Amino acid sequence: MNASEWGEITRLRADGMSIKGIAAHLGMSRNTVRRALTFDVPPPDHRPRAGSASDTDAPRIRALLTAEPGLTVPEIGERIGWSRSRATLARRVAHERDLLTGDDDGGPAPRPGPTGSVPRFATEFVGRSAELRELRDLLGSHRLVTLTGVGGVGKTRLAAQTAVELNRAFADGVRVVELASLRNPALLPQAVFDNLGLGHRDRPDRSAVDTLVEHVRTRHLLIVLDNCEHVLEAAARFVDDVLRATSRVHFLATSREVLNLPGERISVLRPLSGDAVELFESRARDIVPGFAIDESNREAVRRVCERLDGLPLAIELACARLRVLSVQELADRLTDGVDLLSSRGRGAADRHGSLQTAMAWSYELCTRPQQLLWARVSIFAGGFDIRAAESVCADRALPAAEVLDCLYDLVGKSVLQREESRGQVRFRILETIREFGHGLLTDEESERLHERHLGWASGLVAESVRTWFSGGQFAISERLRANLANVRKALETALAVSSDAAAALVSAPWFLWACGLSAREHAMWLGKVLEREDLDPGRRAAVLGTLGLVRTMQGYQAAADPVVAEALELARRAGDRPATAFALDAQGLGLFFGGDHGPAHELLTRSLACYESLPDVREDLPCAVRVHLGLLLCFDGRTAEAARYFDDVRGRCEQVGERWMLSYAVVGQGLVAVVEERFADAVALARESLALKRDFEDAVGTPLAMDVLGWAEAGAGSATRSATLIGAASVLWRAFGQQLYGSAQWMARRERFVLRARSELGNAAFDAAVRRGAAMTMTELMDFALDRQVAGGPVGDDGVTAVLSRREREVAGHLAAGRTNREIAEVLVVSHRTVEGHVEHILRKLNLRNRNQVAVALLQAGTGATRS
């Protein structure tokens, strides 16, 4: 079991799946699942990491650079006996130098998270054993395999099963990225970036591909790109770029067309033959419990499978009819034929006739309301919930009161797939079935549905903005995150029909980085809106203001200044006081980060006064200004005034149960405590802020709180913890933009505490701790930052062993006692290979070269070990 599998197990368990169900879904034993659920953090991965030649030399290169940072590439090559490409060595040296120095262009990246996990299916996987073996063999020796076949032949299901079975073969796991809901090819790299759960690094001078390569360059990873055919050229470019820049990243693509790239191996998926009957029996049993194939129905089942050419999706759709038909009746009706509606379905020529038969027949057997809903839900991208279906699809012909029952029936007919997470039910439609439904719409119907979809999405965003400052904030964030594909589709529609609607969708929710949208994509949509010449001046001011704030927070002040200046000018000219206040805030914040405190204070004060003069102002906007003023006053040493602003915001947030802005007020209070050298209070407040942020993907607030905690720990005398946290914060900042808003004064503040910790630890120990923090996963980092130790684990006073899991601490204790791996395995009742994996992770996390150094590290940490 690796970290990826652990993440998937815990996610499935949190969603309510049983241990038996998880084991069946992931293809592992129940004992493995039970053991995984005992871990609070991902277990170590004991599999060997086979890398490039330069990777095997990485430890020696790193050791040389640590001892002699000024060594040149030729000198390093001579010392390690390098005989291969000088360019390869130069790239490796540059990468290792970045790891050691934390340079802004490189640096260690967190391991990919479980966001793009393997999709779940309610039905069992049947057959395809030969195809699975073929894919396993191909992916073992080739870095790009494309699985092709007609719609409905089962490419997605086979790719998902392959991902499950190969998860353990890749040291950093497998990630599945679903592309069916993606309509803008330009967003494909960002979609992969988001689905890998890597955090967002946005730099104007770098592409999403470049930043992705930084994160996965040294990973042994399989990325599954599902449904590439509608973004084929973009997918091919992306895969080609990543393959050329990495050595251990593999791709499995599913597509109706090949990518046509050098080195691509093609696996053509054919319809089922003998396995078709087995699939029929499995799906029929889901519909009619106890169903079995015997002599009385075997011939009828064979006829059905033959009539449907062994296409899995067609067979599943047909089996849904067994609620009302016998197998014999099903076979007779299919043989007699039905109205295939071929003249009504657009693009039918490129579909397999038997699949058309099954879908058309399923459609004919639906009631008229069910038919209408089937066609209308094809307008959604990436799924939808009941409220969305009622809002977009209901009218006089399909009353809202009937939508729920129709959804229930369409799930029963296998037209829709039901998914549940965190107590919320959503529905998705397979791309082939969606295309069929969309083909049944007239141009007029499609246009009307696009307009209604835009209206619904606009209402969703407007309601989110209106209620953001409330106790329901996390639910709002979750709903926006779940509907990002729909918001993107609405933006495309709005850009074609209504610039003002597009502006409202993307500028009003300025907090989108807490709801799953990256700063890169946010800026892209804002830029597209600004390209429209028919944009209302007031709307343009709002869009410019939001773009200016995003760039300011990222530390790209040269790009932000002209944008904010134009926003302020337009807002004043239009008499738009909210837009004026927003632009004043962004402009004042930029001056503050640039060190120009006098004018910055004046602008921020004017912004707050402007907001407070408005009768119905949104509470989050003036609270943001109060936080900015508090931060500025902290850096001026006026901590009493700063505290009043932070206390005010905290009180307003706690009164309504708001948590996102509250986390900023609390970290502000922590900064006040740092400036006043009340370091114990600062540690507690920074941890409180981080605990509040755990529910949000706040790409700018989390690194701020992590940095402040690192400063506080240094002041409190915990130098190792400080260095670890600052190393982690540096990586998190790079995921959003410049370090500490690109502000020299903020960097100088950090440097004071860096010097404090470094002088206490010494250069080698400080740098080692920084690297440990930079290498942590987000789960490990948050547990470390919040000091959530596993009961019974030895932890030194300076936190050296806090980076180890409970089991790793046990193993470390045995290593310190001089036991061999085999002896440790016998004591802990685990396999020899499992112990090897623990030892590897212990050495990596503690930055040690060999097992003999573990005893010294534990001794320095204040823990001991005895040999029994």
Image: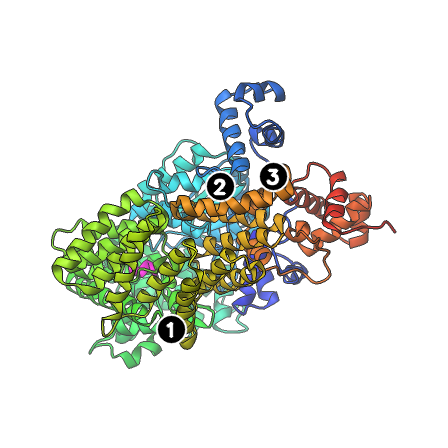
Q: How is the image coloured?
A: rainbow
Kind of residue sitting beneath label 2: Val
Q: Which mark is residue 470?
A: 1
* Mark 1 or 2, nearer chain start: 2
Residue position for label 3: 49
Q: Is residue 239 left or right of residue 507?
A: right
Q: Is residue 423 above or below residue 518?
A: below
Secondary structure mostly taken by the magenta-highlighted segment of the chain: helix
Regarding residue 632, the answer to whether it shows in the image is yes
Toward the bottom, the furthest residue is: 401
Residue at 44%, 58% in the rendered image:
697
Q: Is residue 766 left or right of residue 442?
A: right
Splitting the image into 4 quarters, where does residue 616 fall?
A: bottom left
* Mark 3 or 1, nearer chain start: 3
Q: Which mark is residue 216?
A: 2
Residue at 18%, 48% in the rendered image:
531
